[in-house]
Image (cartoon, rainbow, N blue to C red):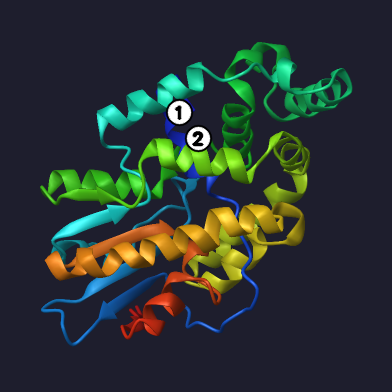
Amino acid sequence: MKTIKNIFTLVLFIATLQAPKAQQDMALENSTLWKVEHSTLEKPSYLLGTLHMMCASDFQIPEKVNIAMTAVDALVVEINLSDSAEIQKMQASMAATKKISEELSPSQFEQLDTLVQRIVGTPLANLDAYGLQVLSSIMISKMLPCTDIKLFEAELMQIAKTNTIPIHAFETIEEQMAIVKEAYPLESSYEQLMLHDSYERDFNKAITAYNNEKLTEAVSYLSKPEYMDENATLLMQVKRNQNWVEQMPKMMEKGSNLFAVGAAHLTDEFGLIHLLREKGYTVSPVLN
């Protein structure tokens, strides 16, 4: 990324990129966009599963999403990074992080240094002050074969701002960073970094599947057991989805929304599609 601000922006999107695997696969039609309806609602809302980042050459907002954006009263995302106050909070938190050399043993630092030099092209010592979370974001951005990277939610927020559509969020930056910290303790963060090569292969497969509207397949590439343990699954998906699905009815009562969250939050038995259906909503795929 070209600037520190872009790196900070990547931190929270990428922190939730790895897709937690719920306990049971549930068959879903091939669509990234879903319509949410209920007899008590005047207008439908929409649920969009995103893949947080990809190369600009691969990135395109589907026309059906653009149409949905023109029909809704508000955009709802995981965190609102169009809010400058939220960005400042994130930057302050990142500035207070421990150095990588303070977190890892000498042996771990040496092994990670070898990987970082190969992937990023600079000694780990040059990135020491950034901390493990920012390093993880930098490493994941290097999984893409490009330097021009598009962040899906950032593009949606820009469309919303251009069209004066209000932007709301399920969580504050502070809330999400606290969840990420609890979900990925030190040893887990180190292990995930060392899985870089495997995750790179699966991540790029996920992009191809996602761009073909194969939502469940895309999530499956990022939800292998080695990428997510039970603790992270509970904190990053199950509890957050349960919290969000309690917020969504109140939001939909006030007006039509486009809910844009990571694709992994839609699938499986703890996914938002199933949870909304359990609450009596009709959730149907918006096909091309």
Provide the residue designation for mark 2: 11
The local secondary structure at tag 1 comes to helix
Provide the residue designation for mark 1: 8
Mark 1 neighbour density, 10 Å: few (under 14) some (14–19) many (20 or more) = many
Mark 2 neighbour density, 10 Å: few (under 14) some (14–19) many (20 or more) = many
Q: Judge left or right: residue 71 versus residue 109.
A: left
From the top left corner, tell me how far across and down residue 5 is, in percent: 40, 24
Compared with 163, 8 (above or below) is: above
Residue at the (69%, 20%) spot, across then down: 100
The local secondary structure at tag 2 comes to helix
Which sits in the foreground, 209 or 8?
A: 8
From the top left corner, tell me how far across and down residue 45 is, in percent: 23, 71
Hey, what amino acid is under mark 2? Val
Dividing the picture into quadrants, the one containing residue 181 is: top right
Which sits in the foreground, 124 or 269?
A: 269
Residue 31 in sight from this viewpoint: no
Q: Judge left or right: residue 281 versus residue 231.
A: left
Residue at the (64%, 67%) spot, across then down: 220
Q: Are marks 2 and 1 in contact (CB under 8 Å)?
A: yes
Hey, what amino acid is under mark 1? Phe
**Residue 168: numbered disc:** none
Residue found farthest to the right:
107
